Image: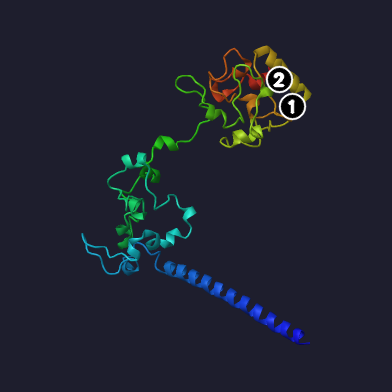
Amino acid sequence: MKRLLILPIVLFFFVSCISLEQTKQEDKSLSEFAAREKVKEKDAYHYTGKYCTDCHEQAPQRGGSRYLKHGGDYNLLCKCHLEAPNSYIHPVDIKPSKEKEERFPPDLPLQDEKVTCITCHDIYRQCQRRTVDKFSLRGAPYARRTDFCFKCHYKKSYGKLDPHTQLEENGETRVKVCLYCHTEKPDEIRARFEDVKFYGDLAMLCQRCHMIRGNHSGNFNHMVKPSPEILANMTLMEEKFGIILPLDADGKMTCITCHNPHQKGVIPPERAAAKGADSKFRHRLPDRMCIECHQMA
């Protein structure tokens, strides 16, 4: 009987402790939310000239001490921006590589040899009251924001990859580019189309860059199995003009049925797969593709 009386009491205290802990967590979340809302109430904080003491112990003097709080730790001073660090474009509190250090502009200050908020941002501008020219990147304005990035980073390293530029200047095949679509580099001299391996659906490989879907071309969706009549015409075209018109694994037409995705010179010119590589739109049979396939003449 005593055990039966004790059990409800234990359960009551257990549930009460859980509720108390949940309440503490909720209160903490509400406090954090209120703190963020307080910042919002401060006219987005920057460019108001009102909140010096949030970062400074006392008003700093030009050329003298800045009297920064938190020992000048910008991870704390700029904590509003660091609540979600993965959403920001550049990491902080890192030491530049030796390569970057050699070309680091003198007007971008490091702190203890590390990149911090003030490396890229002139925070003093944000402390001033401004109704216009609200930009803080050092040396701004820039025509493009990335122009600032290329003060340290090599622009060439961040250019878009053109998967159709497949040859080096010396004529060698750029194997890394082959692997943009192929699971392994094909033998461009001997491989047949059925030997070549791709990453997934052929049309989707092209549509990663070429946003063409639906009725293409001639206001008709060509991504279908050709009719027996069209298939016979395609076979005749391959024999007559020495070209290939490959279908996908399901026997459907796809982008590379009509278009040659390879740069001129990748595949030896005597091979059927090389035809059309230097034509406008990379048509495998320039100027006569539609006419021959649909027997329009």
Query: Compared to 32, does 222 lie above or below?
Result: above
Q: Secondary structure at mark 2?
A: helix
Amino acid type for the residue under numbered disc 2: Met
x, y (%) of residue 221? 68, 33
Residue at 21 percent across and 61 percent down: it is: 64
What quarter of the picture does the N terminus occupy?
bottom right
Residue 134, image x and y in percent? 35, 56
Q: Nearer the viewer, residue 219 or 279?
A: 279
What residue sits right under mark 1 in the picture? 226
Residue at the extreme left: 63
What amino acid type should be assigned to the residue bearing mark 1? Pro
Q: Is residue 213 above or below residue 178?
A: below
Residue 219 occupies which quadrant of the picture?
A: top right
Residue nearer the viewer, 242 or 34: 34
Residue corresponding to mark 2: 234
- Residue at image coords 44%, 67%: 40
Q: Which residue is outermost to the front?
A: 2
Which numbered disc flags the more N-terminal residue, 2 or 1?
Answer: 1
Across the whole image, how many numbered discs are drawn on residues?
Answer: 2
